[in-house]
Image (tube, grey):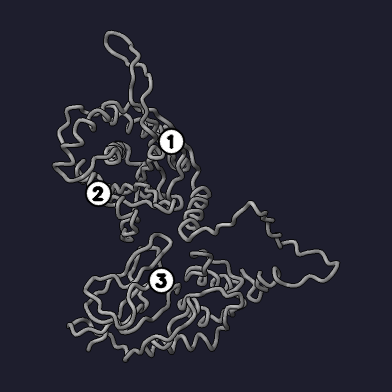
Amino acid sequence: MAKVELLMPKMGESIMEATILKWLKKPGDTIALDEAVLEIATDKVDSEVPSPVAGVLAALMFEEGAVVPVGGILAVIETEAGATVSPSPAVAAPAPQAASAPVAAAMPAETANLSAAITTKIESPAAGRFYSPLVLNIANQEGVSMQELENLPGTGNEGRVTKKDILQYVADKKAGKTTANAAPAAATATAPVSSGAAPAANVTPAPSVGGNMEIIEMDRMRRMIADNMIASKRTSAHVTSFVEADMTNVVMWRDKVKKEFEQRYGEKLTFTPIFIEAAVKAIQDFPMINVSVDGTNLIVKKDINIGMAAALPSGNLIVPVIHNADQYNLAGLAKRVNDLANRARTNKLKPDEIQGGTYTISNVGSFGNVMGTPIIPQPQVAIMAVGAIRKKPAVIETESGDLIGIRSMMFLSHSYDHRVVDGALGGMFVRRMADYLEQWDMNRPI
């Protein structure tokens, strides 16, 4: 039987590694073509890795919880099909190991030899901190000790040291910008203090928790959201402009056509595709909203990729992206919106479906909020929050005079990066989007 290696897929341009969340198959299980073998997580999204061939799962290379670099061997599948055969030798069933350690008994000889070399030259982490094989290999080649690694702050998930972190450290070390043998921070925090001695200045006492309190650790996604929100506030100079739009025509038109729309297309017509269509038209009128910043340069995006913030059952947030939204009609947008929203709730989104957004819409009205001040998802420069549609008295201007009537009104809240989007552009954009909504054609066909 031929042996085929299942590799860690590339999950995006900036993603170099992923964490194994759960193995869906175990050695000896039969696997169909494109059947999911395991679940993985990056700092962007959780995803499943399908099998490239049909066969039998021969061995697992890593346990759950391990961080594997892109292109790393995840498992070996035995198949009788004429698939590309790897040069790996026969693989035995994996022996139980620590949750984050590679399964040495199941590794190909080349991988096992590399791990052995790392083990002999790099000591075990003193504080139980996990390092990917890629990081350990670079540290070994560059003569970076475990003491230095323990003291190296990481920018990866849960503070892990990434390839970028270790390479930057090596470069700084060679340039004399860092102290190679600095004592680990953990040593200061855990060193005993003699009687009568003052406590270390950098040790923060743990907060006191009473009986009426409960400590809940943030889950992985919530920690990533927190980091991304703080990073965005530090990066962009946030400003928010507000416009109140008369949604009466949109509401009446949707009420009139939604049953026929569902019968014809098999999709429910929500307000979200209507908002997206209006945003696309406004972006076409003001293309400098559809940009990102690179130092002192502006990158103007020709594609209009609209992100739509979606709340998950866990309470967390994810932003699926409709790529080339300007190429869809309203029915196409409705199908795409419903599909992405449904798969977001069931954790079935693909990695490329949450990347590449150039502008984002957040529907805070779905929670009954009338307006909000959304935080810009980097590297975009703007985001729109649409509030709840509420009936309220409003002035109606007519040729024969002004009247007071009951209208369906909604606030649009436009947050933008004041480094590159001035108040004039940011304000005109949100006003233009409101104009498209207010001028909705009541006789528009579906």
Q: In the image, which disc is placed on residue 369? A: 1
Q: Residue at x 31, y 28 (%)?
A: 247
Question: Which of the two discs, 2 and 1, labels the residue nearer the N terminus?
Answer: 2
113 vs 369, nearest the viewer = 369
**Where 52 falls versus 292 (above or below)?**
below
Residue linked to disc 3: 20
**Mark 1: secondary structure:** loop
Label 3: few (<14), some (14–19) or many (≥20) C-alpha neighbours in 10 Å: many
Q: In the image, which disc is placed on residue 336? A: 2
Q: Residue at x 17, y 27 (%)?
A: 443
Label 2: few (<14), some (14–19) or many (≥20) C-alpha neighbours in 10 Å: some
Q: Which residue is situated farthest in the right direction here? A: 196
Amino acid found under the numbered disc labelled 3: Ile
| Quadrant in the picture for residue 193 | bottom right
Between the residue at mark 3 and the residue at mark 1, the CA separation in whole angstroms equals: 37 Å
**Mark 3: secondary structure:** strand
Residue 133: horizontal and vertical position, in percent? Answer: 46, 78
**Where 234 falls versus 48 (above or below)?**
above
Q: Residue at x 30, y 38 (%)?
A: 275
